[in-house]
Image: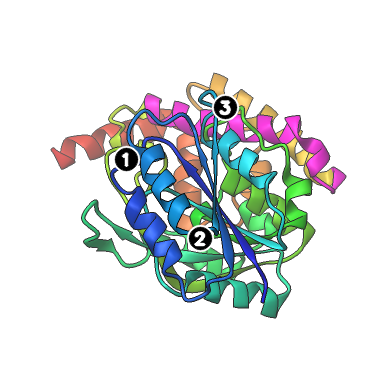
């Protein structure tokens, strides 16, 4: 029976950490190690974890001497992986009982480099708000139709806490990029996995994905709260600039020289858009190449916002006036 290493990064998680650990310990698949790294919590997280260490020898705890942040905390844990497969865990979710068993079976049956699943979105009290995170985020059809490096290249659709991956992926993915809040460990791991093998998915929610006020990353988008067209457009451009800056800084991780060239051309394109006030007439072909795998409405919305801001700004104002 294969042993799976589960990587749980914690920081001030006392409110929900007990429920999460319990959900892992109550899995139908029992052969795992739970590796926990606490990032200098100032609440009772460490005390809660220490009680579990006394009860279950499968739990191994590390304590950081200074706060290193979530990405570096997961990187630290990835370096501790000893077994063939590893999984990521957040501190505030609930794993459904067959999560390990089903994802492990899928990765072994398919020979995939990485497997991920859908999530059930719940509130703080575990009341279901959305049965499918994929459908909530509008990525269900994209996953079903493409599920490839090319479709991951522009936008991530793999949620880290659902992932099981092969240990060999760690050497290819480390060090994790740490310069952008938009290219996090789950996106990077998935992107590298999709270049080095196939990625597979399970069309089932295997996690209760808890959303609450202290979430670092969750189901809400920052653009949902923006009231200014300029602020929204600046955000769209900044996200992609950071995105491609990370790719260029880590271009040795991209096997194909054509992709490396595309990274540089794409950064130049978004830097040009940053200076565009009225209309941009250059690089439309590049835009549609980058957004090829996106849904039509999303693609055209982004095209107008990025390339024809003078018209889209007026439409934005009209929409805001009507909605009041």
Which residue in the structure is indicated by mark 2?
A: 162
The span from disc 3 to disc 1 (Cα, nearest Å) is: 22 Å
Which residue in the structure is indicated by mark 3?
A: 273
- Find numbered disc 1 in the image and state the secondary structure of the residue it sits on: helix
The span from disc 1 to disc 2 (Cα, nearest Å) is: 24 Å
Question: In the figure, residue 200 lies in which quadrant?
Answer: bottom right
Question: Considering depth in this image, is 60 or 195 the residue closer to the camera?
Answer: 60
Which residue in the structure is indicated by mark 1?
A: 224
Compared with 76, 8 (above or below) is below
Camera-side mark, 1 or 2: 2
Which quarter of the rendering shows the C terminus?
Answer: top left
Question: Which residue is at 54% across, 75% downward?
Answer: 101
Q: Earlier in the sequence, mark 3 or mark 1?
A: 1
Q: Position of residue 113 (x, y in %)?
A: 71, 64
Camera-side mark, 3 or 2: 2
Magenta stretch: give its range: 231-257
Asked if residue 308 can be seen in this view, the reply is: no
């Amino acid at each position: 029976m294969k042993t799976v290493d589960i990587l749980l990064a914690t920081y001030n998680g006392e409110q929900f950490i007990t429920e999460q650990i319990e959900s892992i310990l109550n899995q139908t698949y029992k052969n795992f190690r739970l590796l926990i790294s606490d990032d200098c919590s100032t609440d009772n997280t460490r005390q809660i974890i220490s009680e579990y260490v006394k009860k279950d020898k499968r739990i191994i705890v590390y304590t950081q001497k200074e706060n290193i942040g979530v990405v570096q905390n997961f990187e630290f844990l990835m370096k501790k992986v000893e077994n063939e497969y590893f999984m990521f865990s957040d501190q505030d979710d609930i794993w459904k009982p067959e999560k390990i068993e089903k994802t492990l079976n899928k990765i072994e049956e398919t020979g995939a480099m990485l497997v991920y699943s859908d999530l059930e979105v719940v509130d703080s009290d575990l009341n279901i708000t959305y049965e499918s995170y994929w459908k909530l985020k509008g990525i269900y059809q994209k996953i079903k139709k493409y599920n490839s490096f090319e479709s991951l290249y522009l936008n991530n659709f793999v949620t880290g806490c659902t992932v099981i991956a092969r240990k060999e992926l760690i050497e290819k993915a480390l060090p994790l990029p740490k310069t952008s809040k938009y290219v996090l460990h789950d996106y990077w791991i998935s992107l590298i996995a999709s270049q080095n093998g196939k990625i597979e998915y399970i069309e089932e929610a295997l996690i209760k994905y808890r959303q609450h006020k202290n979430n670092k990353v969750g189901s809400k988008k920052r653009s949902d709260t923006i009231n200014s067209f300029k602020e929204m457009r600046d955000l769209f451009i900044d996200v992609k600039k950071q995105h491609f800056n990370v790719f260029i800084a880590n271009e040795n991780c991209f096997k194909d020289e054509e992709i490396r060239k595309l990274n540089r051309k794409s950064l130049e394109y978004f830097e040009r858009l940053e200076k565009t006030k009225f209309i941009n007439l250059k690089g439309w072909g590049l835009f549609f190449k980058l957004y090829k795998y996106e849904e039509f409405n999303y693609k055209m919305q982004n095209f107008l916002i990025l390339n024809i801001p003078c018209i889209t700004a007026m439409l934005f104002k009209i929409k805001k006036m009507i909605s009041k």
